[in-house]
Image (tube, grey):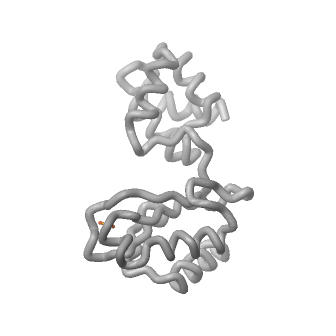
């Protein structure tokens, strides 16, 4: 991991002003911010771990928890909720055999929920790896997960 983190740091410039860009690249590479990677960033950029932790928790794009290769997020805002979002969560929990907020043991899927993402007309919607999937139903959710599993 250290070699890859060093490459990311080199690409962005080993200076304090590159901190956000470096964290974004690490998040993109690992889907979360592993502790050893953050320690390396702290050492190479000369930024304290407390400052890095602050950045990592302030920006919602960052995660300090290990997440799956595919991030599946169900919108639980009011519009999506009344159109059946809770049933989508139940279906995803069933097919992935995890609860919302968890990651599968094989690290392939994380299941998350979020409040309104501003696309209510598409509700109920889920976001898979950053892509909005609107007008979702339980069968569509199952098919989507099956497709992603086949692709892996
Ligand atoms: S409630 Fe789901 S996008 Fe607004």
Image point (34%, 63%), residue name: 77
Residue 119, located in which quarter of the rendered image? bottom left
- Across and down, in percent, residue 63 comes to 51, 42
- Across and down, in percent, residue 60 comes to 40, 43
Image point (65%, 74%), residue name: 95
Q: Is residue 93 above or below residue 16?
A: below
Q: Is residue 144 above or below residue 15?
A: below
Q: Nearer the viewer, residue 5 or 94?
A: 94
Q: Quadrant of the N terminus?
A: top right
Q: Quadrant of the C terminus?
A: bottom right
- Quarter of the image where ligand 1 sits: bottom left
Residue 104, located in which quarter of the rendered image? bottom right
Image point (38%, 38%), residue name: 59
Image point (47%, 71%), residue name: 86
Q: Nearer the viewer, residue 98 or 25?
A: 98
- As drawn, is 44 to the left or to the right of 21? right
Residue 15, located in which quarter of the rendered image? top left
- Across and down, in percent, residue 28 comes to 50, 46
- Across and down, in percent, residue 66 comes to 62, 45
- As drawn, is 120 to the left or to the right of 88? left
């Amino acid at each position: 991991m250290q070699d890859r983190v060093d490459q990311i740091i080199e690409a962005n410039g080993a200076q304090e002003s590159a901190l956000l860009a470096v964290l974004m690249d690490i998040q993109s590479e690992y889907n979360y911010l592993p502790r050893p990677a953050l320690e390396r960033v702290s050492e190479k950029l000369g930024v304290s771990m407390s400052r890095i932790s602050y950045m990592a928790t302030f920006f919602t794009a960052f995660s300090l928890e290990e997440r799956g290769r595919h991030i599946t997020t169900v919108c639980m805002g009011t519009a999506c909720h009344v159109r059946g979002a809770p049933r989508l969560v139940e279906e995803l929990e069933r097919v992935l055999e995890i609860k919302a907020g968890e990651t599968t043991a094989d690290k392939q899927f994380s299941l998350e929920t979020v409040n309104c993402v501003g696309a209510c007309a598409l509700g109920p919607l889920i976001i898979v790896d950053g892509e909005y999937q609107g007008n979702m139903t339980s069968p569509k959710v199952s098919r989507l997960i099956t497709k992603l599993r086949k692709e892996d």
